[in-house]
Image: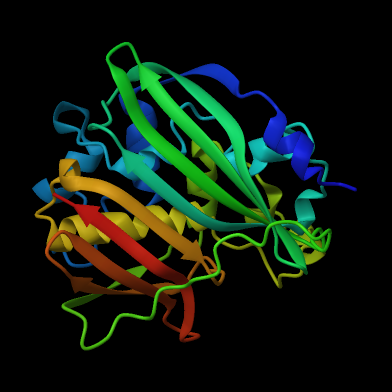
Amino acid sequence: MPIDAALALAAGPHAGEISWTPRDVQLYHLGIGAGANPDKEDPATDPDELRYTLESRLHVLPSFATVAGGGSPGVVRALSMPGVDVDLAKVLHGGQYLTPHRPVPASGTATATSRIAAVYDKGEAAVLVMRTEVADADGPLWTDDARIFVRGEGGWGGDRGPASRPDPPAGTPDRTVERPVRPDQALLYRLSGDLNPLHADPAFAGLAGFDRPVLHGLCTYGITLKAVVDTLLGGDVTRVRGYGTRFTGVVYPGETLRIRMWRGEDWVRVTVDAAERDTAVLTGTVVQHR
């Protein structure tokens, strides 16, 4: 069987050193649309955008953690773990859950320790949870869970995992913003480390069942967090204490993201649609904040 749940869960963690520089942070921010905020009259030089793009005043959006070190994303790394042997074309990114333990520095060296934390049997598919814990000399920096949906690999009678899904937010959103996705957004974003051909090669995208290359789910994830921070958190990246979402649809480069936000006391619930198709792409999204 391509997924051996017992072997995957029993395997020891894999640890390695990662490092990043302000240049890596700037490239990531540009890949999620920094410097192109349509709400700004001159976004390339607006002070609120320069904190993402100018090294002398650089603030690090917590979602940078998903690409820090520039290696393969958790979705791809999970496929090389013991007990996992599946075709990349069957793999979809199901969700991402990030817990920052303190602000991410603009440059650093840290140890990233990864393991398969859970394997769920959803019948028609398997779901892997790849957990990565990152710490530097001063202690824990962040914990990151990537949920990986593997089509056609369920049905062995294993644990189905959590079944509850939050109800959609009720009432009128407190804020709605739209963020255009550039036609070359995926080509720019992939330079931060996710070189999956699904996001660049039309032939590979066709094998995976898509009409054309799709945007990285983690790019949509980053665009969304930036919109929430800029719109409801006063641009203060250090206020984010947790961020999770489920990827429920694809985004094609050139489309527009419609981001709706409902504010709570210490949380923001979010839904994200591909506006032109009126199709949900992120659901169950919550940004927890101070």
Could you say which is closer to the camera, residue 7 or residue 241? 7
Residue 53: x and y, percent?
Answer: 25, 39
Q: How is the image coloured?
A: rainbow
Q: Is residue 56 visible?
A: yes
Eyeballing the image, is 85 above or below 141? below
Number of marks drawn: 0
Q: Residue furthest right?
A: 1
At horizontal 48% and vertical 69% (from top left) the residue drawn is: 254
In the figure, is residue 188 to the left or right of 152? Answer: left
Q: Is residue 42 visible?
A: no
Residue 101: x and y, percent?
Answer: 28, 33
At horizontal 35% and vertical 22% (from top left) the residue drawn is: 21
At horizontal 32% and vertical 62% (from top left) the residue drawn is: 286
Residue 154: x and y, percent?
Answer: 79, 61
In the figure, is residue 137 to the left or right of 88? Answer: left
Eyeballing the image, is 76 above or below 260? above
Eyeballing the image, is 277 above or below 2? below
Q: Quadrant of residue 106?
A: top left
Could you say which is closer to the camera, residue 151 or residue 22? 151
Q: Quadrant of residue 168?
A: bottom left
In the figure, is residue 78 to the left or right of 112? Answer: right
Q: Quadrant of residue 227?
A: bottom left
At horizontal 46% and vertical 86% (from top left) the residue drawn is: 278
Could you say which is closer to the camera, residue 175 or residue 244? 244
Residue 8: x and y, percent?
Answer: 73, 37
In the figure, is residue 183 to the left or right of 129? Answer: left
